[in-house]
Amino acid sequence: MSPAESDSSDVEQQRRLRRHKLFAAALLVAMAAVFVASHWLPPGPWWVGYIQAAAEAGVVGGLADWFAVTALFRHPMGLPIPHTAILPNNKKRIGEGLGRFVEHNFLAPDLVAGKIRAMDPAARLTRWLSRRRNADRVADWLAFVLPGVLRGIDDVEVRVLVERAAVAGLGSRRLQPLLAQAMRAVAASPAYQDLLDRLLAIGRDVLRENEDWVLAQVSERSRWWVPQRVDRRLAETLLASVEDLLDSLARPDHPIRRDFDAALAGAIDRFEVSPRVRSELEVLKTQWLTHPTTAAALGDLWDELREALINALERDRPAVARSLTQGLRRLAVRLRADPGARENLNTRVEAFVARALVPIRGEIGAFIAQVVDRWDSRTMSRRLELAVGRDLQYIRINGTLVGALVGAGLHALTHFL
């Protein structure tokens, strides 16, 4: 609420309070006037006694309730009567009580968690992000503030955090199954077959380029009495056979190639379950994670990632905002389609609020008590009277009317007895 709206509300409350005070006072004056006038009436008619008794009791009831209502906020008629001006004189105690009341009845973790659960933040977030305008607004804001946020982050603390998180994450993971899965993925990919084809092609090229060397090796190992042309013929036959084999192996369905694939799969299976491999990998992993250059490399990774993000955001912020919008809308679609994701988000919100609220709810109660204690007594009384004074005037009105009825009833009772 703006200050102008607050002032307007105060003026309206003051106007209503004055009107109700005037009505209660007018009723009391009217009752007093009836009481005075009734004593001027001749004593003959039976109903005069009822009017006198009702008016007298109405005046007493109205005055008593006026005193009670007024004593809450100030000394009646300015007289320092004990146990009056209750609210100003007990400001500190009221503040402490209000703080404890809010702390235990509004900020209790169970109550807050129940309220959050009833609100269903995940469903609200889903509906809100489903509107393109809202997703665009959040994305534009993120694209605008992220460069400054990234620049303002303490490099030393983040580097340490990244290093610790990476070391902890890698240290808790077993490398053996990860490497086995990676090798299986490579073996099953077309790139693996392309690599074999490329190696076979390289083998053929190397063989052709070294025909003279093969011939020289055959001649060198041949008997002295074998003619040179026989050695050449033998070398050419050997080269042709090897080249034919390499050409045949280029076919994926060749038996030798299938046997090689099966042998590779078996080797990967043995690699995955080998205790010796597991032990050696754990030793290598520990040595790598504890090496000083590893921490430096992880810290450099954060620096490079941050610079890349800042450059991307500053170079083409609209494109980044569009990407963020798409990501936010995909998040909304996922939340809408996955009740488990919504429940998980709600649980995390409840846990976060509980963790954040429990340590500080006592401080919130103390803060409320301090604020109330710092209020000016007159200002506090005026504020409270504006808030509830109009309803309290009905106590005065009811006191006058009920007093009149009780007075008439008692008069009737004494008359018939």
Image (cartoon, grey):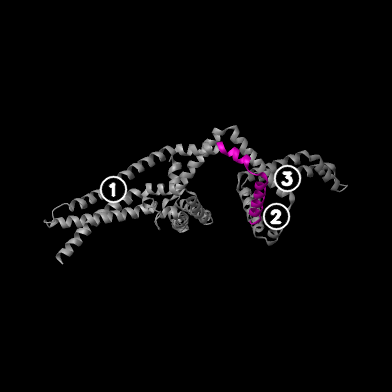
In the image, residue 284 lies at what x, y percent?
Answer: 72, 55
Left or right side of 415 for 310? right
Q: Is residue 167 magenta?
A: yes
Outermost right residue: 224
Amino acid beneath label 1: Ala
What is the spatial separation of the Cα atoms under label 1 and label 2, in whole angstroms?
Answer: 88 Å
First of labels 3, 1 by sequence position: 1
Q: Quadrant of the N terminus?
A: top left
Q: Quadrant of the C terminus?
A: bottom left
Nearest the camera: 153 or 181?
153
Amino acid beneath label 3: Val
In the image, residue 121 lies at what x, y percent?
Answer: 45, 49
In the image, residue 256 lies at what x, y percent?
Answer: 66, 50
Outermost left residue: 44
Tell which tag, 3 or 2, sits nearer the viewer: 2
Query: Which of the labelled discs sits on residue 337, or is there none?
Result: none
* Circle 2 residue: 285
Tell which tag, 1 or 2, sits nearer the viewer: 1
* Circle 3 residue: 242
Instruction: Examine the rendered structure and indicate whether residue 415 appears above or below residue 303.
Output: below
* Circle 1 residue: 25
For the magenta stretch, what is the residue range? 144-172
What kind of secondary structure does the magenta stretch mostly adopt? helix
Q: Could you tell me which residue is drawn at 56 percent across and 38 percent down?
A: 145
What is the spatial separation of the Cα atoms under label 3 and label 2, in whole angstroms?
Answer: 42 Å
At label 1, counting other C-alpha atoms closer than 10 Å, the crowd grade (few under 14, some 14-19, many 20 or more) is some
